[in-house]
Amino acid sequence: VQLQAFGGGLVQAGDSLRVTCAASGRTFSDYAMGWFRQAPGKEREFVATISRGGGTTYYKDSVKGRFSISRDNDKNTVYLQMNSLKPEDTAVYYCARDRVRRRSGLVAVTVEEYDYWGQGTLVTVSS
């Protein structure tokens, strides 16, 4: 399984940006997917997750109402739409695949629950 994240860039506070993660393999729809981020000098943190069928999503409190995760299982792709971006959203954003095949509707929120990771895409939000 390979994950490739892209779509990051430099934006101003208040702008929107969508990052995308493309996955290889034939079992994409069997796993929940997540987005994490890591700011300089900080630990990697959970941002959002989506269940394997897309019916359940869960977000970090600070991004609720601003970020939206979605997936297209036909295209093996997961997206993170980020609106009303703030300077504190600046980080490298990583997509990841759940370590286990959970029952439909269940998700994972910790770094340890994910096993495959993309290379990350940098999002910089200027004030």
Image (spheres, helix red, strand yellow):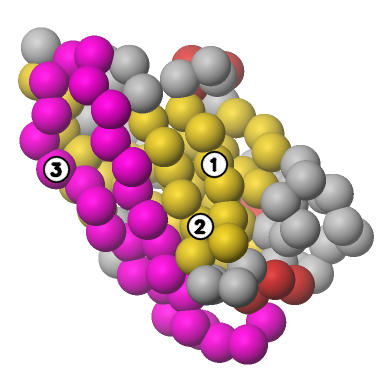
The location of residue 20, given as percent across then percent down, is 37, 56
In which quarter of the view is residue 42 placed?
Answer: top left
Was residue 15 drawn as part of the magenta stretch in this picture? Answer: yes
Q: Earlier in the sequence, mark 1 or mark 3?
A: 3
Label 2 element class: strand
- Provide the secondary structure element on which disc 3 rests: strand
> From the viewer's perspective, is 20 left or right of 29?
left
Residue annotated with mark 3: 9
Q: Position of residue 44 (x, y in %)?
A: 40, 43
Q: Which residue is mark 1?
A: 69
Residue displayed at 71% across by 51% down: 54
**Residue in the image at 37% along x and 31% along y:** 82
Depicted 73 relative to depicted 88: above or below? below
Tell me which segment is drawn in magenta: 1-27
- Residue 117 at least partly seen: no
Confirm whether the magenta stretch covers residue 22.
yes
Residue depicted at x 41% and y 37%: 81
